[in-house]
Amino acid sequence: MKTVYVLNGPNLNALGNREPGIYGGRTLSGIESDCRTTAAELGFEVDFRQTNHEGLLVDWLHEASERDVIGVVLNAGAYTHTSIALHDAIRTIQPIPVIEVHLSNVHAREAFRQQSLISPVAAGVIFGLGPLGYVLGLRALAARP
């Protein structure tokens, strides 16, 4: 069966409690459930992970290329704005597509959140749609040739 990685970065383990006015009240486990349901409908499985450590996200991206993963949905959290290492890891695993996802509209927030080091190497970017962004990211991967 085809596999998609859904990778989550720092502080996303605190969803549901962390600034619900910005990130909503849904927990990461609720988002994981949505992803698994959508993936099953699309005929693939999800490997859903979260870490607060940048290097582990890099390792997981490299692993994706070694395990015949068809795509990655990535919410890198704050590392989106700071991590050249993630940028380089995404370039390293191309042509595996990476869909960058953010729960909030980063362009309506602080100036430092409006710059993504990941967007230039991502296959697509979805932001501001809350948990639906993850589902749309999976659907985007399924629709790719």
Image: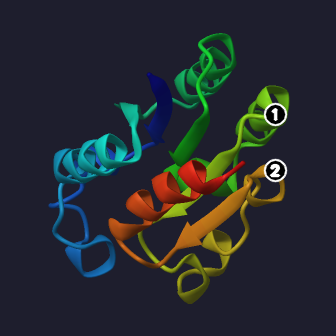
- Mark 2 crowd level (few <14, some 14–19, many ≥20, 10 Å Cα): some
67 shown above or below 113 = above
Q: Position of residue 61 (x, y in %)?
A: 63, 26
Q: Nearer the viewer, residue 141 or 1?
A: 1
Work out whether mark 1 precedes mark 2 in sequence or the reverse, and give the earlier one. 1
Q: Is residue 61 left or right of residue 78?
A: right
Disc number placed over residue 94 in the picture, else none: 1
Give the foreground label among 1 and 2.
1
124 shown above or below 62 = below
Q: Is residue 81 left or right of residue 13?
A: right
Which residue does the image show at 24% across and 56% down from the upper left? 15
Report which quarter residue 1 is drawn in.
Answer: top left
44 shown above or below 122 = above
Q: Nearer the viewer, residue 44 or 7?
A: 44
Observer able to see residue 50? no
Disc number placed over residue 27 in the picture, else none: none
Q: Position of residue 69 (x, y in %)?
A: 58, 25
Q: What amino acid does circle 1 point to? A: Gln
Q: Secondary structure at mark 2?
A: helix
Q: Is residue 28 left or right of residue 67?
A: left
Q: What amino acid does circle 2 point to? A: Val
Q: Position of residue 14 (x, y in %)?
A: 23, 50
Q: Secondary structure at mark 1?
A: loop
Q: Nearer the viewer, residue 107 or 135?
A: 135
Q: Position of residue 145 (x, y in %)?
A: 72, 48
Which residue does the image show at 57% across and 31% down from the upper left? 54
Report which quarter residue 135 is drawn in.
Answer: bottom left
Could you tell me if the residues under marks 1 and 2 are in contact, i.e. CB atoms within 8 Å?
yes
- Mark 1 crowd level (few <14, some 14–19, many ≥20, 10 Å Cα): some
